Amino acid sequence: MPGLEDLYREIILDHYRNPRNRGELESPPAHRAEGFNPLCGDEIVVTLLVDGDTVTDLKIGGQGCSISQSSASMMSAAVKGKSVAEARGLVKAFKAMMSIHEAELDSDGEPDEVLDPEAEPGAKLGDLEALRGVVKFPVRIKCATLSWNTLVNALDDLES
Amino acid sequence: MSAGPMNDSRTNDSRTLDVATIRADFPILEREFNGRRLVYLDSAASSQKPRQVLEAMDRYYETTHANVHRGVYQIAADATHQFEAGRAALARFIGASDPEEIVFTKNVTEAINLVAHSWGRTHLAEGDAVLLTEIEHHANIVPWLQLQQERGIELRYIPVDDDFELDLTDLDRLLDGVKLVGITAMSNVLGTIPPLRRIIDAAHAAGALVLVDGAQWVPHLPTDVAELDCDFFGFTGHKMLGPTGIGGLWARREILESMPPFLGGGEMIRDVRLDGFTPNDIPWRFEAGTPPIAEVIGLHAAIDYLDALGMDAVRRHEVELTTYAMEHLTGRFGDRITIHGPADPTTRGGVLSFAFGDLHPHDISQVLDQEAVCVRAGHHCAKPLMRRMGVGATARASLYLYNDESDVDALGEALASASDFFAF
Ligand SMILES: Cc1ncc(COP(=O)(O)O)c(C=O)c1O
């Protein structure tokens, strides 16, 4: 069985205890999306402001476990100041990091080429790599991806 | 014991549970993870199954399986006999005098949906009110919300007070114009046992029928639907040592007879012509298609197992263990632990929802899993109650007849590890 240290890396606990970009921007003008994890009751609210093509501000509201909250916090830090296209690239790279290992877990096969985060040009996960251990705890993958799916909804809202 | 209306008159039975012997009947409890024995504290979600249940189902498949109610040959007749014997055993177990008042369903959720779909769509029209409570499981809320969308019925809720008991101050006003009251016999989050008899009497005086969700009651306390005087009573087999896929609805004969079939097909008909059909008698009218035969037989074995222990003894054991758990956990962790739900273990069930420091329930459950301690984390399918409590989720440890003080101690140890790990 994988150890707790694989899951709860120090940087994750740091983001959990001191979440970055916490709160909610006034909407409108901010774009707003809510995400729920129906299994555990976690809720995430993403509000973001875009100027031209740049995500100039982004805040995270809601409540949840250390994995969902730290993932949201790290996401906010990674996305703020990036272009919308770069933000979408990060989403892809992050989800790839989650699902590559999801696939490995059940097949023990080679990582799927298409899902390789390195294949996502310009997407540097940085601190977010700390969440890689989550894939060893499949039940928690949904916690880690909640804020990212919510971000996608907010970006879709922006572009529609 | 003053837990409710169903268990006061038969306390001559002073048996106690021999948990060590009981545990030996449950193969899964022999499993180990990382050298630690499985500590199963999630029976409110689903109970484990004794060998006797598993063997009864195997024996049936190995010796007697055939479809029921149809065959003339020996094993088909035996299968039918065993299936209907399960119905009779269940009726006796819950205090129903007539086995034909028991409809088999796949779980309590389906039992409640049967009431909403069949009784509700026949007897409820726009503006009619249904009274529920704030502590209901989604299974006893959503079918009524669906009927609200479809029919425009009005839904009302009995509120829960700050001591986690139902607030009945306004009961008479809430009951005004109500056609049906839907209420749980025990909260799966708080362990709260509402004063059912009082509510049922008031509902009847106001001209309403009462549906009781017995999912958390039947596994843990003696049940007597006649004494309770309710009109519908649902239960679910997998929480009472039985297999998954089997539950049921009890209702008084004249009520069942007033209800049209829910699902159509084989088994539920008396006659079919190309231009119409005549439904079968109750309860088969509500059991379209091949039923879960082995599951009924497994549930029968579960009932025999519970009967042999005695439900009074089961209840006494759980009250003692709940008392121990509440004292042990609050003694060890002080105000770092908050146990939600009524404070008096003699008036509540062994369902302990708790908050621990500022740890999220999901994280608590994860750390506990490292020590093979199984507790649930989440909203327990009671989101309206969670909102009322002002929490998104709780961790929940629930006790059953195979648990003892060593399981509670293991929970305490695992919580101490969680506290160390997250350094608070
Ligand atoms: C009070 C209550 N009602 C209904 C249910 C639903 O049970 P089932 O899923 O077996 O239909 C449960 C169990 O989860 C419960 O605790």
Image (tube, helix red, strand yellow):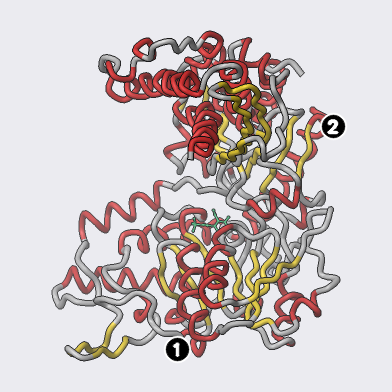
Q: Is residue B229 above or below residue A116?
A: below
**Residue for badge 1:** B257
- Name the mark on residue B319: none
Q: Earlier in the sequence, mark 1 or mark 2?
A: 1
Q: Are marks 1 and 2 on the same chain?
A: yes
Taking the spot 52% from the left edge, 58% from the top edge, the residue there is: B306
Is residue B367 visible in the rendered image? The answer is: no
User: Viewer-proximal residue, B156 or A29?
Assistant: A29
Where residue B297 sits in the image (x, y, percent)? 35, 62
Identify the amino acid type marked 1.
Answer: Glu
Where residue B178 sits in the image (x, y, percent)? 68, 81
User: Viewer-proximal residue, A49 or B302?
Assistant: A49
Discs 1, 2 touching: Cβ within 8 Å: no
| Chain of the residue displaying label 1 | B
Local crowd size for mark 2, using a 10 Å CA cut-off: few (<14), some (14–19), many (≥20): few
Where residue A137 sits in the image (x, y, percent)? 47, 24
Identify the amino acid type marked 2.
Answer: Asp
User: Viewer-proximal residue, B263 or B154?
Assistant: B154
- Image side of residue B93 versus residue B420, left or right: left
Question: Is disc 1 placed on a helix, strand or loop?
Answer: helix
Taking the spot 40% from the left edge, 46% from the top edge, the residue there is: B51
**Residue for badge 2:** B335
